[in-house]
Image (tube, grey):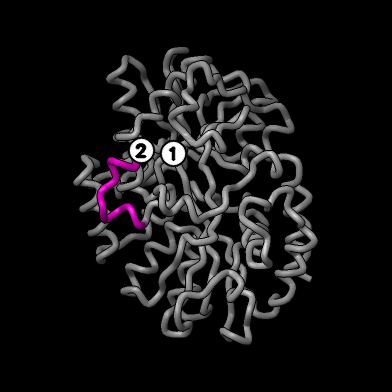
Amino acid sequence: MEKQSFAEDCRALAAELGSGQTRRDLIRSALALGVAPAALALGGGAARAQSGKEVVLVNFGGVAMKAFDEAFVKPFAAQGGKIVLDGSGALNGKILTMVQSRHVTWDICDSGITGLAELSPHGALEKIDYSIVDKKKLDPTFAYDEGVVNYMFSSVLAWDKSKVSGEPTLADFFDTKKYPGRRMMRKDSQAMLELALIADGVPKDKLYPLDVKRAFAKIATIKKDLLFWNSGSESQSLMRDGECVMGLLWHTRANVLADETQGRVTYTFKDGLLQPGLWVVPKGNPAGKEAMRAIASMQQPEGQVKLLAAMGNGPSNPAADALVPAELKKKNPSDAANAAIQAKINAEWYKANHSKTFQSFLDLISS
């Protein structure tokens, strides 16, 4: 079974939101930007393109189906294009099987750095055509040969204010004498290595190539006090229920925690890791270059702000900053002020090192 990705957790998070303040706030923000409340409940099934000019876009269903429809499908239709949504889940193994069997039925997949790292070495992805996709409408840091940023998310430090005084730093996360109590990390090397190195004094702009040995040594110093989460909901419950005094988790879960605990659990983007969700195109996709035109259409800032309101995913087009409502700015990982105090992930390093590093990380935390 593949570990849960950020995109998968977006679906899970939306499904978990109940009738409390968090859901009301989400609906209010969505309505202000023209996203129907149905976006918070709809599921999704599989879809297939009927002709080469239709583009099948695959995500993980749930809230993303209606949110993507409002943010991306309708604007592309207004330009004369057609996107067909498939909510069955863009798992890396499914993409690779399609490509290797030469039976590709998908055109664009909602993926990420791990997808790039696992699929690129197999030649399973098309190169992004930057004569169609506009690099001026994104941070060029996240414009890769075989994947281009679609939205942003962050791994951040959260803490329980009833047990931790002041505003702790990443260095404090590893200081159990100053702040006793259990901590939590993701059961994945991605982001956890970077945050450990920042805590150990490595400058944010000097992280890569990652000193894996140094990061592992730092994590080992508090291993007996660590709990590891595998899903976003698990990270949320560990902090909400008081099992951990601090945690490293996705900003979307941290936002919900801050709301549902009425500020008892809070977080900071400072020294976090800014990461991109990515559009990837399977090799031999049926729609061909039309997929690139669809991706270019999805760079419009208005649609990306709707996605932020509906799902919490940060816009990838810097022009969206001016359109984000004030109440969402502090929760937006790609807001200029928030992005400036974070490190940025390096996909090339993960393409070369993800597989072996991930396994070594699992060996470290299980030993």
Q: Which residues are magenta?
A: 321-330
Q: Main secondary structure of the magenta part?
A: helix
**Which residue corresponds to the image point at 42% horizontal and 57% vertical from the top-left?**
252
Q: Is residue 321 above or below residue 326?
A: above
**Which residue corresponds to the image point at 72% horizontal and 47% vertical from the top-left?**
354
**Which residue corresponds to the image point at 67% horizontal and 35% vertical from the top-left?**
119
Q: Secondary structure at mark 1?
A: loop
Crowd class of label 1 (few under 14; some 14 to 19; many from 20; radius 10 Å): many
x and y percent of residue 326 in the render? 26, 53
Marks 1,2: beta carbons within 8 A: yes
Residue where numbered disc 2 is placed: 304
**Which residue corresponds to the image point at 58% horizontal and 80% vertical from the top-left?**
182
Q: Quadrant of residue 186?
A: bottom right
x and y percent of residue 338 in the render? 43, 54
Residue where numbered disc 1 is placed: 316
Q: Secondary structure at mark 2?
A: helix
Foreground label between 1 and 2? 1
**So how many labels did they put on this image?**
2
Q: Quadrant of residue 330?
A: bottom left
